[in-house]
Amino acid sequence: MSRSSKISVAFGGLLIAATWLYLVLVRPTDWESVGGSTEALITLVGYVAGTIALLVGVLPTLPARTIAIIPVALVLNILLGQVTGSFVIPLYLDAVGTVLVAALAGPSAGLATGALSSVVWALFNPLALPFAAGSALTGWLTGVVIKKGAFKNIFATIISGAVIGLITGAVAAPVAAFVYGGTAGVGTGAVVSLFREMGNSLLASVTWQSFISDPLDKAIVMLIVFVVVKSLPKRTTRALVPQRVPEDVA
Amino acid sequence: MNPLTWIIGAFSMWIVVLGVNKLGLSIAVIIIAQVVAMIRVRNVSVLASTALLSVPALASMALIHMPYSSDGWLIALTLTARFSALMSIFLLAATAITIPELVKSLYRWPKLAYIVGSALQMIPQGKQTLALVRDANALRGRSVKGPVRAVKYVGLPLITHLLSAGAARAIPLEVAGLDRPGPRTVLVEVVEGRVEKHCRWLLPLLAVGMAWWL
């Protein structure tokens, strides 16, 4: 990775982290004011600009073999996400392609796939756009844990997925709360409503909903990808392993 | 207009809608975006897509906000209108974008151009594969109801089929020189004015200023 790429990735990562820290630490005075404009703008601009910087840094470093499978992953994310979204369940399953690329081609490829998935999907379903930073983080983190051995057995796979879900859920919660003022799905809305019934504030309810849906969702996604990777023909997996960037080999 | 101008313009309008954050503006944006979309595409596809996204959002907002305060219905309505305005804007922009023009406008970033163009073209192919897998299961008389059977008999064949097709493209891409550094050119560039070319990147700043002023 060149110096300019490293700077771009560092800037993007810092911008997303700073946005999240600002929204969590410098909380709105009124916890119910999730529909406010300032927090919504900070979330949107911070996350989208950070994701663009990450893509500018990572994309040129990916070899053609990896680039070849990213569109497939994007299509998988969109199709599976659409199918799951049509059910009234608080799950998404829109990261199967992202995690698959992360497993086959490493964390950088996972990051680019996650981010681009939200950007391309936004042309049909604009709801996805502000979640690009969370999707990028999902791709990068799953790539890292798979590289460290998360796929050595089924239990490690499920636990890694659940832990990643907690982190990405925390990152996605400000988007759901501030940009959309809640959630946009009936299933997730019902879970948020349940938490409000228990006496939680709106923002806390949205965050708790993320902490329930996301770990379960990512654990299932990791499990699906684990099964797929184990059942893929060796010829296919060999053809997809990057040749030019040794650090990306999963 | 260049597709990038439409996308950046839509993003800038998001900034205005979120920044101003008023029910009246959200409703005005929905109406204008839907009318322009209907004139452009001469059907109600954008309206239908917006409704498809907004109806679950309305149900969710009603569940979250209405039972917990006296003006919950107003909060739910305001947030749903804002949500629908955001969706309308981007869907309107999408009607003005064709895949070849979008790919041409991204020629300076060849890897990005390949990913975006290829993914957009593969979506119908992916849907077709999904239908084929479902048909194959139906012909075998195999039920795919329930999450485990759906993943096993629909999800896994879909993934392996699409992935194998993707893997087959890897070597041609290498041979075509996607990894080679250096600038790319296109035979016929996207038609755009000089002002548009140089000023579209200023639209988000203009939007921030407008949101602050309003």
Image (cartoon, helix red, strand yellow):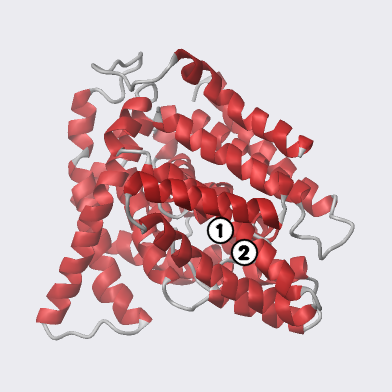
Residue at left 60%, top 51%? Answer: B28
| Residue at which label 1 appears | B84
Disc 2 residue type (three-letter): Thr
Q: What is the chain letter for disc 2?
A: B
Disc 2, SS: helix
Secondary structure of the residue carrying numbered label 1: helix
Residue B45 is labelled as none
| Callouts 2 and 1 on one subunit | yes
| The image quarter in which residue B71 lies | bottom right
Q: Alpha-carbon neighbours of circle 1 within 10 Å: few (<14), some, or many (≥20)?
A: many
Chain containing the residue with disc 1: B
Three-letter amino acid code of the residue under disc 1: Ser
Mark 2 highlights which residue?
A: B80
Percent x, y of residue B188: 25, 18
B182 to the left or right of B36: left
Q: Position of residue B30 (x, y in %)?
A: 55, 54
Q: Residue furthest left?
A: B139
Q: Are marks 2 and 1 in contact (CB under 8 Å)?
A: yes
Residue at (34, 21) in percent of width and height: B191
Which quadrant of the figure has residue B178? Answer: top left
Tell whether A92 sits left or right of A65.
Answer: right
| Disc 2 to disc 1, C-alpha distance | 6 Å
Q: Position of residue B213 (x, y in %)?
A: 78, 35
Residue B196 against residue B131 in the figure, above or below: above
Vertical arrangement, residue A171 with respect to residue B102, above or below: below
Q: Indicate whether B5 appears above or below A93.
A: above
Return the residue nearer the eye: B109 or A97.
Answer: B109
The extreme right residue here reads A29
B124, B83: nearer the viewer: B83
